[in-house]
Image (cartoon, rainbow, N blue to C red):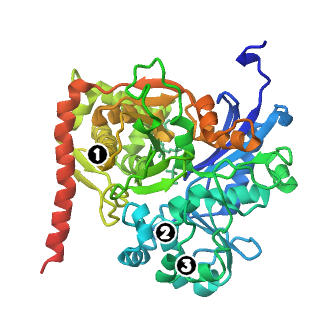
Amino acid sequence: MPGRDQEPRSYYVGVDVGTGSVRAALVDQRGILLAFADQPINQWEPQFNHHEQSSEDIWAACCVVTKQVVQGIDVNQIRGLGFDATCSLVVLDKQFRPLPVNHEGDPHRNIIMWLDHRAVSQVHRINETKHSVLQCVGGVMSVEMQAPKLLWLKENMRETCWDKAGHFFDLPDFLSWKATGVSARSLCSLVCKWTYSAEKGWDDSFWKMIGLEDFVADNYSKIGNQVLPPGASLGHGLTPEAAKDLGLPAGIAVAASLIDAHAGGLGVIGADVRGYGLACEGQPVTSRLAVICGTSSCHMGISKDPIFVPGVWGPYFSAMVPGFWLNEGGQSVTGKLIDHMVQGHAAFPELQAKATARCQSVYAYLNSHLDLIKKARPVGFLTVDLHVWPDFHGNRSPLADLTLKGMVTGLKLSQDLDDLAILYLATVQAIAFGTRLIIEAMEAAGHSISTLFLCGGLSKNPLFVQMHADITGMPVVLSQEVESVLVGAAILGACASGDFASVQEAMARMSKVGKVVLPRLEDKRYYDKKYQVFLKLVEHQKEYAAIMKGD
Ligand SMILES: Nc1ncnc2c1ncn2[C@@H]1O[C@H](COP(=O)(O)OP(=O)(O)O)[C@@H](O)[C@H]1O
Ligand SMILES: O=C(CO)[C@H](O)[C@H](O)COP(=O)(O)O
């Protein structure tokens, strides 16, 4: 009998649409990534807190990268296709053509991105209703969810957008519709971002109460009245038109999609950890927390029974791993914050020139620069008098306060490369302290987490990974495949093809441990003190706001 390695290869294509780029991978049935391609996508910020994209631009990028990863292989071995994407809102008219979401009327910009904060007044009013659906989003709805954005469109673009709109899609569902012509929505997007309940369906009273009774009247046809579990096979598979666009055979299985963070969760959380000496070995999968770190970071914890964590989204049933409840903590900007701090510093041009001369990324250069200046002490100790509060775009979890701002304390007159490197380090540490705060909130509510599984662009940064281990005191597992979000998307394609009986089976076969990073427990006292300062920062920020509000 041939060994596993001689098994005929089945291939799956995963497509991951992040905030900044679209990525595709060709993955085999063992979860090995055989080809990878990526392509940046356009983003518009026509005014502060308005962030828009184009669904046509994104689909075109999906086609470019997919064609690249299947070049030179026998496409008949491709068994399935899976998409994941950010939870952005796509608006189409009744003929499925893009509709502008801006007053300039630019039809290319038909997506209100997840990080768009235009609907502040709308979300405030939604939260004032105290409707029971809010219990399943941590008690407070985020401005980044779809209901406030829909209400904004109705209140601000009634004639040019709202009245003409025929279809509102979450981006992952738009992609599966483009590929198959099937407009069924994934349970993942509807439950996590649209207040749909896996058990009870839509709640008419919520939509009526917030002024969007229109959806109830037409039986939710514009936002989805056919719902499928992630990984379910859609319609008759890939349409001939989409097959031509993507360079794939018509009719291959296409899966109901996932939001990108959830695909990352599938890509990492089910790995076989035997032999690594981890606390989660032999323990239920609920002791693992997947942290997907890209433009934002998402903290995905699962449980057998629903757990209500104030300020943390969920509990959502079967929205990531079937049969499990999901809680999703998050930080709205992490990769974006690091980029912002580094690129905005006076020494950035010098950094760029030096990194280019060494053929390194600016982050690799900064990490080695920190190693040079740390002398005999651990690198993390360079920030003894520099502290950052990272909520430059509000706090998603666990404070659920979009009015919070970023803070830096300990600035000096110097603006040289040392100064930039230390500010970068303090920012990375602040993000890790934010993760610690989220974990503490989840544990206080009933989760029991022992091990972190990191993926996403920031997991390629060894300093970011080590700081997460040191500051949370937990081991961090990195996957064998760096692009684990794409493994998650391919798992969806594999499930849709019928090659695996369940998502759990596909996860166990296709996600694998690559490396374990242990916390430096000898530095714990230092980080505990910095954490105390971290908590004081937000306390003080609230005090400042109260002083300024007073007479
Ligand atoms: N090789 C790298 N080293 C360090 N940081 C990286 C690297 N690649 C990406 N990043 C960081 O990851 C972030 C983007 O992650 P990514 O997962 O690509 O984002 P998204 O899915 O939101 O498009 C960037 O903001 C950057 O800070
Ligand atoms: O809300 C989210 C997931 O529920 C994500 O933050 C959003 O989808 C953006 O992801 P990324 O930072 O990878 O671009």
What percent of the width, then of the height, locates residue 207?
Answer: 52, 78
Q: Earlier along the polypeptide chain: callout 2 or callout 1? A: 2
Label 2, secondary structure: give it.
loop
* Relative horizontal placement of residue 420, taking residue 362 as reference (left or right): left
Q: Nearer the viewer, residue 180 or 423?
A: 180
* Relative horizontal placement of residue 431, taking residue 257 as reference (left or right): left
Q: Is residue 295 visible?
A: no
Q: Tell me the mark number nearer the camera, choosing from 1 and 3.
A: 1
Q: Earlier along the polypeptide chain: callout 2 or callout 3? A: 2
Amino acid type indicated by mark 2: His
Quarter of the figure with residue 32: top right
Q: CA distance from mark 2 to mark 3?
A: 13 Å
Amino acid type indicated by mark 3: Leu
Q: Nearer the viewer, residue 67 or 4?
A: 4
Q: Nearer the viewer, residue 450 or 382?
A: 450
Q: Residues within 10 Å of mark 1 (few under 14, many from 20)?
A: some
Whether tag 2 and tag 1 are in contact, CB under 8 A, the answer is no
Q: Which residue is mark 2?
A: 50
What percent of the width, then of the height, locates residue 389?
Answer: 27, 52
What percent of the width, then of the height, locates residue 237?
Answer: 80, 51
Q: Residues within 10 Å of mark 3 (few under 14, many from 20)?
A: some
Q: Residues within 10 Å of mark 2 (few under 14, many from 20)?
A: some
Q: In the picture shown, does residue 448 fall above or below 73?
A: below
Q: Residue furthest left?
A: 551
Q: Earlier along the polypeptide chain: callout 1 or callout 3? A: 3
Q: In the picture shown, does residue 120 fall above or below 59?
A: below
Residue visible at 48% across and 30% down?
478
Look at the image and tell me in which quarter the C terminus lies: bottom left
Q: Which residue is mark 3?
A: 153
Q: Tell me the mark number nearer the camera, choosing from 2 and 3.
A: 3
Whether tag 1 and tag 3 are in contact, CB under 8 A, the answer is no
Q: Which residue is mark 1?
A: 440
